[in-house]
Structure formats: C-alpha cells, structure tokens
C-alpha cells in the first residue's frame, strides 16, 4: 500500500513570482522525493503525469522556427507512459492534436490495448495558436487549470513534465499543487552560456578561448578585440546570447582581413556592424543586441578543424540527487555557419562516446551540488588531433532538447538502456540498437500531406516501426507537415548503417509520393 504524500496545501493562490509562491514551490519540490522513491519504481502504482510541452523560450526567436506550435507534439512520445496499466496522462497543447496522430502513438504500446490506454489519456487544448508560450496560455485560462485538476484522481500521485522550467512553469506547479520533474528556475544561470563556461572551468573541462558575462554591444566588441590579440590564430568568433537555443541566438564575426599588426580595436569597430552575421532568419542587428542587452552573453572562438564533430551528452539528476549519463549523440548542425541544430545520430561515435560520457558525468556531479534536477544536455565541439580527439565543452541546456524525444521513444519501444561505460545501447533482448533522427526533414513538395496521408504512405511502403524486429521509422511533428512541408523522424536500426538506410528510404518514398 503506497501512502500519499502530505503536499503543501495551497488554499489561496500567492501572487505570481512572489516570495510566497517561490517558497511554496520549493516545499512542493521537496515532497517530490517521497513520490520518486515510492511510486517511480513500481510500474503498477497509480500515478498521473501532466505533460506541458511548452517551449518557454524567447518568443521572437522561436517565431523564426517554421511550424513551432507543432513542436509541442515532440513529447507525444511520453504517451508511452500509458504502458503502465494504472498510469494516467494529461497532455496539454496550444491547438488540438489530430486523432490520427494520437492513435499512431497508442498503437505502439506493448501489452496494452489502444482502448485501455485511451481511457487513461486526457487531451486538453488552449485553442490558441498565438506566439505566446503554451504555459503562459494555460496560466491565462483558470478554467483550464481547474479542468486539469479535475482530471487528476484523488488516489494518484502526480507531477508535471515540461520541456523547460521557468517562472511560468513554477507558477503553474503551485496552482496545480504538484511538483515538476525539472530544474528550479532559480538555477537558471547554470544553464546560460556564461554559466556553462564557468561550470566547465570548475570541472577542468576545456572550453574555447573567450569571455562570458558580457552585457552589451560595446563589451562584445571589446571582447572580440581581446580575443584576437590574445589568440592571433583565431579566424572567426561566435557571439551568443545567454539564453539562445538551437543556434538561433548566435551570430558569427570573421577576422578575415584583420591586420597582423596595428590597431585591432579600430579595425573591429569599423567592420563589426557590417560583417556580423546573425544566425536567426529575419532578426535585425538592432533586435539582436536589444535582446543581448536583456540576456547578456558570451564571445568565444569559433573552433576550427579538418575533422570536426558536434557530440552531446544527455544526463539526468533525480530527486534524491543521483546523477546518471543517459545517452550520447553526434549532432547534425546546419545553416551558413553550422550553428543550427537539425538532428542527431545515436549513440555518438565509438571513438569518443565513452570519453565525452565521462565528462558529462563530471558536469552532472558538479550541477548536483547546486541542486539541479531533471534531464539536461552538455554540448561539445570535438576536433580530431593525431590519433585522438580534443573536446571543447560549449554549453549546458538545463531542459529537454532535440535529442530527448528520439531517445525516449527508443527506450519506450525497446525497454533498453544506454551503457555509458561501453558507449552502446542494448534493448531488453540484449540486442544493440541505433538511430538516426531529424527534426527537419522538409520539402516544398511535402506541403498538403495530411497526417492520414503520411500514415498511409508509411504503411504501404513498410516504413513504420515494427515491434517484432525492433526496427523502422517513428514520425513526429506530423502536425506541421501539411502547412509547412516539414516533419521529424527517428529511424531505428540494428546497426548505424541500417538506421541511416531507413532515413534514406523515407526521403526516397516521400519524394516519390509527392513528385
């Protein structure tokens, strides 16, 4: 018999972002330890997970991402929690999710009928496609909050699962009176570009030459001058907003033509505004530095190399303070300067997966001292030097990311785990599995394809994931396909080559069907 925790009872709601609200949130989070210890290990325990897949990030930068409202579908992989027969899931979105998409996920549940799962799934929507974050939309709808509460059974433990946690998610947790499996927003600085560099330095992990805690355009220019003077070999530098994401808060400055001797300060000042290239499409120079001034940021050398990769490590810190490396990836970066996240292959190269995994564990142990909770990623730039690799830590993302949902999907489907000591993932049947994933498979010719069309095409061409072979293709961002010609895929195979073959076949089939 599992006893229910004695959560702090919120009778009258405190003012948003007040000290009272913050203290209530911290107490609710402390109570989460009991839930984690008593409920999480028991697959038969009654529980409710409230999923708020809100990208609570800079909305102007997010608006540059085509079909961003459909990115809320990426956490639909968490519907696989319904494989636990007494688990209930409440999934909230800005706009309704097509029933075909929901059925697509539910048919994959092992050992559970779709009918049984549907009885334990509640889908709620704000019916609001505006640029505001989903969590802000929910907070503006007290009746919707009450509806969420009404759908949490009295006998259930409950917690919030979010993409990232800000003061908005904190307020929602207090209003719902349930904990959130994510990082306290008071620790936000640890996951900024400046905070990341300081954490890496404390862990004795290499970072590119650079400067953090810059406040404005003037300090950026001064930092570029100092960077070039101290490191004459630097060809380019990256300017990053502290809270940028997927490369969209970055800009690149080239030192091409800089004098070997003479006044570097005057040269940078004269070239900067004209030569500075902003990654986010349509973001003006003035808007970039207006945002930079509010966020702060860094300047660091653009890492060069003939053989260069962008691996990442995903870690988790649980409510009792245990740290774990849960996956490694090689990220695919695109855009003119290679700053934009497009997708990833799993696991990272066997040449360095174990090495970067151990570095990620060091970072996780350091962050645990600050009280960080939940999943987070550590990004690297790795350059091959002679017979080894030189790894530069780039940033910490104290949130879920572009590699979270592909790995969760693999884990839910195969019931396996990644071994950080070997660098391999083994399914429950002890067979290795790999995947190639992308959030950015797109073509103008794909526009007009509905979710029904995609599922039909995938079935007829034998692309869909097959539970018997534990191989095939999982689709996500399906709602973005018809309007934006864009979708996401996770291509699972028994070898890295096999996984990529599924990706190539998917592209070939979609191109043929829409020719």
Image (cartoon, rainbow, N blue to C red):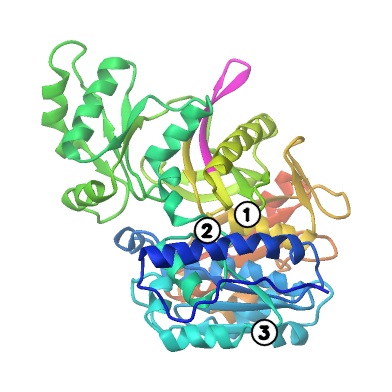
Within 10 Å of disc 1 (Cα), the crowding (few <14, some 14-19, many 20+) is: few
Q: Nearer the viewer, mark 2 or mark 1?
A: 2
Q: Which mark is residue 348?
A: none
Q: Nearer the viewer, mark 1 or mark 3?
A: 3
Region rendered in magenta: 378-393
Give whichever of discs 2 and 1 has the lower sequence position.
2
Q: Quadrant of residue 35?
A: bottom right
The one nearer the camera, 92 or 195, is: 195
**Residue indicated by mark 2:** 439
Q: Are marks 1 and 3 in contact (CB under 8 Å)?
A: no
Instruction: Give the number of callouts.
Output: 3
**Residue indicated by mark 1:** 504
Whole-angstrom CA distance, mark 2 to mark 3, is 38 Å
Q: Is residue 243 above or below residue 166?
A: above
Whole-angstrom CA distance, mark 2 to mark 1, is 15 Å
Residue 69 on image: x %, y %: 43, 71
User: Circle 2 sits in a helix, a strand or a loop, which is it?
Assistant: strand
Residue 246 on image: x %, y %: 43, 50
Give whichever of discs 1 and 3 has the lower sequence position.
3
Q: Quadrant of residue 473?
A: bottom right
Going by the image, does 405 lie left or right of 93?
right
**Residue indicated by mark 3:** 154
């Amino acid at each position: 018999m599992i006893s229910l925790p004695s959560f702090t009872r919120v009778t009258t709601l405190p003012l948003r972002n007040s000290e009272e609200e913050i203290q209530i949130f911290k107490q609710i989070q402390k109570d989460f330890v009991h839930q984690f210890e008593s409920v999480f290990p028991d697959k038969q325990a009654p529980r409710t997970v409230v999923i708020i897949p809100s990208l609570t990030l800079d909305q102007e930068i997010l608006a540059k991402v085509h079909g961003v409202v459909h990115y809320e579908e990426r956490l639909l992989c968490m519907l696989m929690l319904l494989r636990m027969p007494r688990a209930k899931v409440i999934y909230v979105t800005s706009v309704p999710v097509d029933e075909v998409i929901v059925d697509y996920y539910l048919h994959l549940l092992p050992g559970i009928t779709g009918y049984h799962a549907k009885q334990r799934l509640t889908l709620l929507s704000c019916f609001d496609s505006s640029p505001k974050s989903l969590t802000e939309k929910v907070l503006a709808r007290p009746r919707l909050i009450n509806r969420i509460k009404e759908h949490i059974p009295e006998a259930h433990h409950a917690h919030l699962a979010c993409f990232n946690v800000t003061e908005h998610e904190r307020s929602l947790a207090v209003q719902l009176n349930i904990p959130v499996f994510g990082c306290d927003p008071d620790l936000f600085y640890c996951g900024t570009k400046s905070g990341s560099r300081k954490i890496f330095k404390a862990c004795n992990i290499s970072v590119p030459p650079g400067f953090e805690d810059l406040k404005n355009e003037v300090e950026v220019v001064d930092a570029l001058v100092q960077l070039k003077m101290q490191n004459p070999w630097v060809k380019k530098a990256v300017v990053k907003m502290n809270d940028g994401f997927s490369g969209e808060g970055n800009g690149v400055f080239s030192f091409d033509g800089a004098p070997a001797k003479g006044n570097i300060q005057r040269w940078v000042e004269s070239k900067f505004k004209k030569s500075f290239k902003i990654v986010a499409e349509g973001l003006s120079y003035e808007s970039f530095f207006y945002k930079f001034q509010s966020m702060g940021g860094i300047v660091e050398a653009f890492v060069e190399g003939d053989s260069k990769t962008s691996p990442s490590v995903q870690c988790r810190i649980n409510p009792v303070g245990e740290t774990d490396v849960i996956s490694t990836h090689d990220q695919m970066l695109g855009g003119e300067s290679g700053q934009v996240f497009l997708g990833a292959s799993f696991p990272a190269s066997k040449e360095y997966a174990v090495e970067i995994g151990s570095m990620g564990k060091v970072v996780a142990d350091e962050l645990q001292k600050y009280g960080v909770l939940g999943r987070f990623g550590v990004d690297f730039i790795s350059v091959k030097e002679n017979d080894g690799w030189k790894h530069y830590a780039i940033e910490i993302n104290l949130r879920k990311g572009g590699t979270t949902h592909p790995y969760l999907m693999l884990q839910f489907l195969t019931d396996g785990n990644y071994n950080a000591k070997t660098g391999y993932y083994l399914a429950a049947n002890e067979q290795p599995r790999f995947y190639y994933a992308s959030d950015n498979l797109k073509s103008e010719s794909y526009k007009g394809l509905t979710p029904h069309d995609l599922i039909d095409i995938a079935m007829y061409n034998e692309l869909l994931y097959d539970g018997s072979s534990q191989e095939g293709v999982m689709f996500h961002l399906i709602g973005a396909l018809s309007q934006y010609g864009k979708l996401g895929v996770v291509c699972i195979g028994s070898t890295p080559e096999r996984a990529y073959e599924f990706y190539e076949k998917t592209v070939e089939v979609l191109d043929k069907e829409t020719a």
